[in-house]
Amino acid sequence: MTDAPTVATDADAQDDAVDLPDAVDAPDATDLPDAPDDVDTGDLATPDERGGFIAPVPMEEDPAELFAGDSGTLDADVRRVLVRLLQRRFLVADRNRAQWRTLLENQQVIESRLHDLFVHLVVDHDRGIAYKRQVRSAELDVPVLLRDDAYSRAETLVLVHLRTVFQRERGAGETSVRVDVEEIEQTALTYFDPDDTNVAGHQREIRAAVARLAKEGLIEEESEGRFRVTPLVEVVLSNERLTELRAWLGEQVRAASGVQVRGGAGEEDVR
């Protein structure tokens, strides 16, 4: 039994309110000492003109702040991209062109913020995909922010079929790869025990697996029961892992034991 790709879920971070000290009022002009009688004050600058005693601007009126008490330094659009990367498993250029452009224009600072959380940022320019990976080190005590969730047996079988079809069709020069749900179902069923009479139950498992992979963006339904396979399958399941799994499945085709796979892409979101 192999391990499955893991998807991080459930953000644990809490928005604890922080009390900020009250701003200190600048002295009024009337509090300043009078100039000596023998000094001509006609040409002296007022406190405001000298810039030394400008009345403070309330925080809620500060144009650099997005909300009261905001001490962040990133623009709103950059913060939204950072949050999306933490919340979702992938950021896909074709579906989020504005956020993709923001990511590329601010990649260094976004990457730095993720590194502060012990998280890697991976930007695949060729496929137009960005995702995250948990930093893991034997030399450093790294707190784990992202959790790995295994694919189920049915999800793994569907994923292997999708990746196989994608590889075959792309190798034949096809730029767009499509599959029917009936084809997926029949192929996945061949890996279940033929003596198992619960075919309807396995069919439900496979349909649920298709639904999950569609939700994650690995396939997109173009019409009822007809799906386009996206390049995300290459990220989740590498060529090396695909070869390994197909060989194993060939040996276990009559086995009813569970199968799981660990994907090549990063985890979905924070704990």
Image: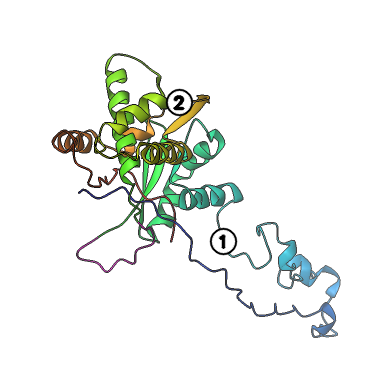
The reply to whether residue 241 is visible in this rendering is: yes
Q: Is residue 140 left or right of residue 178?
A: left
Residue at the (73%, 64%) spot, across then down:
60
- Under circle 1, the secondary element is loop
Give residue 183's mark.
none
The residue carrying pointer 2 sits among few (fewer than 14), some (14 to 19) or many (20 or more) residues within 10 Å by Cα, namely some
Relative horizontal placement of residue 243, taking residue 221 as reference (left or right): left
Verify whether residue 143 appears in magenta: yes
In the shown orientation, is residue 113 left or right of residue 1? right
Q: Main secondary structure of the magenta part?
A: loop
Q: Give the residue at the far left of this rendering.
A: 251
Secondary structure under tag 2 reads: strand
| Three-letter code for the amino acid on which mark 1 is drawn | Gly
Q: Quadrant of residue 188?
A: top left
* Residue 231 within the segment the image draws in magenta: no
* Residue at the (15%, 34%) spot, across then down: 247
Residue, disc 2: 227
Magenta stretch, residue numbers: 137-147
Q: Nearer the viewer, residue 162 or 101?
A: 162
Q: Is 84 above or below relative to 61?
A: above
- Seen from the viewer's position, the closer of residues 121 and 75 is 121
Residue 104 visible in the picture: no
Where in the figure is residue 216, as x and y percent of width and height?
Answer: 45, 41
Which residue is identified by label 1?
72
